[in-house]
Image (spheres, helix red, strand yellow):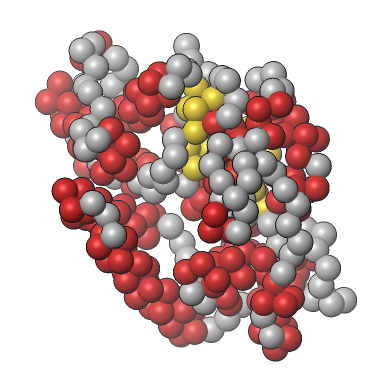
Amino acid sequence: MRQPPVFVVGMNGSGTTMMLDCLNAHPELYGYPRETLIIPHYIANLASYGDLADDDRFEALWNEFRNLSCFRWLNRGDPPPLPGDWRSRPRTLATIVDATFHYYARNHGKDRWCEKTPMHAQHIAALSELFPGACFVHMIRDGRSCAASFNRRWGYHPERTIYRWRNLIHTARAQAAASGARYHEVFYERLTEDPEREMRQVCELLEVPFDPAVLTPGRPRVHTGQNERSITRKASNWAGFFSPGRVRRLEHLAGGTLADLGYDVPAGARDHEPPRWRRRLWVLRDQLRLGWLLVWRSLTTPRERKWVDFRGRLQAAVRQSRTTKD
């Protein structure tokens, strides 16, 4: 029996990619390098695939899953192969998901896989039920820093980002407590201040020996302005990035959560709920930007792969939106 998988979750811009790369550097762990987005979709819609005890239905679901672009992209356009003994394997969605990720892990000489889709923080209970014993590493960073990162990199609306950030934290904590999941929070600021202390705690959660390799992530994070392959301390720059007025609006939305997590905010700060019409405008604006980003990426992707990847990314994004609360 293989060790249960590891899910790295948390608000985008909170250090989830860095954590995945740290885990991937461990000799016993393989970090799948692409966000899949879609596991909760299959959990929510599993009944529509019928009785998996039926060979045809089980094979059909397995073929659909392994043919997703997020898996073919890493295999030169080909899906991971259907195992020759697929008929004798347990007839569950977990079997299919595990076999697909394990194919890539095995190609790297490893047996245990890690997956990073930030919004899977909203699905800890479902993922924990699918994979009993699964570990969840939740990256948390100052919501104002996440808002600055999202706006700088993709132009996303800062108020929407911090609103999503606060809701994501509350949802993840509630689901982890209710499901009894193996769950651990890593604060980005503490990780970059004392990497070894924090990564030793993560290794303890995962029940793997600490290895110094986890202190040197494999990919440079060029988009953050960091080219080195190491965990380095980066000062919070949200105060200089946003105007004082915008900072006040961000703290108006999530001041209570920021305070509860130990971040500095004005005394008496608390969370406020924005009007529904305003949230819808934020979503519409950001969805338009995301659509343009997907088109731009397709235009800069090699010709023979661009449209398959574009369709796959768009389909995955739509499926994630149907299972994820804003």
At x 54%, y 54%, the residue is 222
Residue 21, quarter of picture: top right
With 4 as the anchor, is 143 left or right in this view?
right
Q: Closest to the observer: 288 or 239? A: 239
Against 301, is 58 above or below? above
Residue 77, quarter of picture: top left
**The residue positioned farthest toward the front in the image shown:** 227
- x%, y% of residue 184? 68, 39
Residue 136 visible? The answer is no
- x%, y% of residue 12? 54, 57
**The residue positioned farthest toward the bottom in the image shown:** 245
Number of numbered discs visible in the structure rendering: 0
At x 35%, y 23%, the residue is 103
At x 67%, y 41%, the residue is 230
With 213 as the anchor, is 298 left or right in this view?
left
**The residue positioned farthest toward the left in the image shown:** 56
At x 12%, y 25%, the residue is 56
Against 224, is 184 above or below? above
- x%, y% of residue 87? 21, 14
With 71 as the anchor, is 11 left or right in this view?
right
Residue 293 visible? The answer is yes
- x%, y% of residue 109? 45, 17
Against 77, is 111 above or below? above
**The residue positioned farthest toward the right in the image shown:** 267
